[in-house]
Image: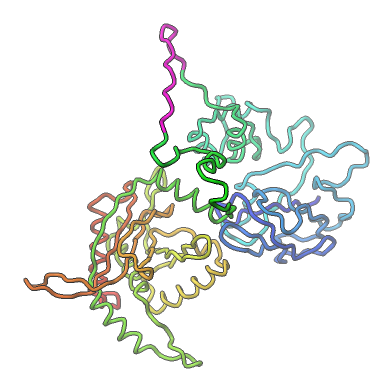
Amino acid sequence: MPINVLMPALSPTMEKGNLAKWLKKEGDPIKSGDVLAEIETDKATMEVEAIDEGVLAKILVPEGTADVPVNDLIAIIAAEGEDPSSVQAGGAPKAASNGAAKPEPKVDASAANQNTTPGGGHMAYERVNAAPEGAQPGGAPQAGAQAGSGGRVFASPLARRIAKQEGVDLGAVQGSGPHGRIIARDVQAAKASGATKAPAAAQPAAEAPKAAPAPKAAPAGGAPAGLTADQVKGFFAKDAYEEVPLDGMRKTIAKRLTEAMQVAPHFYLTVDCELDALMKLRETLNGSAGKDKDGKPAFKLSVNDFVIKAMGLALTRVPAANAVWAEDRILRFKHAEVGVAVAIDGGLFTPVIRRADEKTLSTISNEMKDFAARARAKKLKPEEYQGGVTSVSNLGMFGIKHFTAVINPPQSSILAVGAGEKRVVVKDGAPAVVQVMTCTLSCDHRVLDGALGAELVSAFKGLIENPMGMLV
């Protein structure tokens, strides 16, 4: 039977991708492990490999196509012994009769990618079998029929969350997942149609319905929330701006950080850290670095390398803070995973230093140089920038003294690092000039209470001001 090649989900948050380039053409033999295509996600360009064998019978999505939804059919592989010319776009061999081909079944991400890992470079596949007579395409029941004998609606957790947020009645949504399961795109399609809003609670017959509240006036000099693009543009003269289309990265950043501010209750803790001892140790360590075969230093430590290491050690010294929120529980980690924000054109990456508490400063430094270079070239693998418990965002190189940062889900905190500068402080009852760096920790109050967050910040400050503790 033919093998359908689906647009893979290369990360847990990926919804669409761009089919940048086909590396095989129709008629080419395919072996397991062959690279079939290059897919551009919101974060990177990935090579995807075949996990089955056969002949590439038909390419359904040409290279250069943008915004291809995850799990859409993009190609068909004829299995061993099949005639590639007899395979049609529906994915099944051509029937002997002239009857119309049955619609192609759809599957959701959890089913289509059951043989792949998040971020793994393998295509999603499904074998095409004949559907039972009378079945709906993909095995989905008619709209409203998802409920079982007990009235249960079969839907993915993400679909349920979106439906709750948007007020969509799942009982009136037709699922396109396996066995009629409702998935996220079904809810989004239902929301767009406007026909499946959850019914309002019934009012007592004797009670007159309340009048709808008057819309809020726009704030002076600004626009109210929820405006369409055309309404926003109406506030400005047409020759006053140029329109910049959103790419996948900017859309993802906007969506995820908006959700973070709406869902995660942020609070902020700010400390000033003296850098004099750290700067002296950094100079000593850099001066002692060995040379490689080209005569270049084996490492060159930055202040940010010390910050990453200090944050990793602080998390392990305050283990209750080394945790993330997981809806019905808290996940507490044994080692520290520290993300580091890397700015690129149009957005940013946050590659994660794994086991930052265990790695040496030189290892962290070299790892970050590699991450930063590949981030700017959009060559990071999804598993290199996903996860993490906390992140470091350093704007000191821009002269920023103090700022607050938005937590990057699913992490539970983020440290905003300002510039080091000379300041006059009082020491032993007398004024003294020291180099000071202001740092602000944004905390998710679902995981960290004020005292716990303060304990974490205090541990970080102690390591920065006594940096020899990072070497032992």
Magenta residues: mostly which secondary structure?
A: loop
Give the vertical position of 268 relative to 159 (above or below). Answer: below
Give residue 234's quadrant in the image. top right
Please tell me which residue lies in front, 466 or 242: 242
Extent of the magenta region:
202-217
Please tell me which residue lies in front, 465 or 141: 465
At which x and y percent is residue 457? 26, 61
Query: Does the magenta run of residues contain 163?
Result: no
Q: The C terminus appears in which quarter of the rendering?
A: bottom left
Give the vertical position of 176 relative to 253 (above or below). Answer: above
Please report the residue visible at 36 percent of the width from the left and 58 percent of the height from the top: 414
Please report the residue visible at 12 percent of the width from the left and 70 percent of the height from the top: 426
At which x and y percent is residue 264? 38, 46
Left or right of 18: which side holds 212?
A: left
Please report the residue visible at 39 percent of the width from the left and 74 percent of the height from the top: 359
Left or right of 52: which side holds 270?
A: left
At which x and y percent is residue 198? 52, 26
Query: Does the magenta run of residues contain 215?
Result: yes
Give residue 133's quadrant in the image. top right
Please report the residue visible at 29 percent of the width from the left and 63 percent of the height from the top: 439
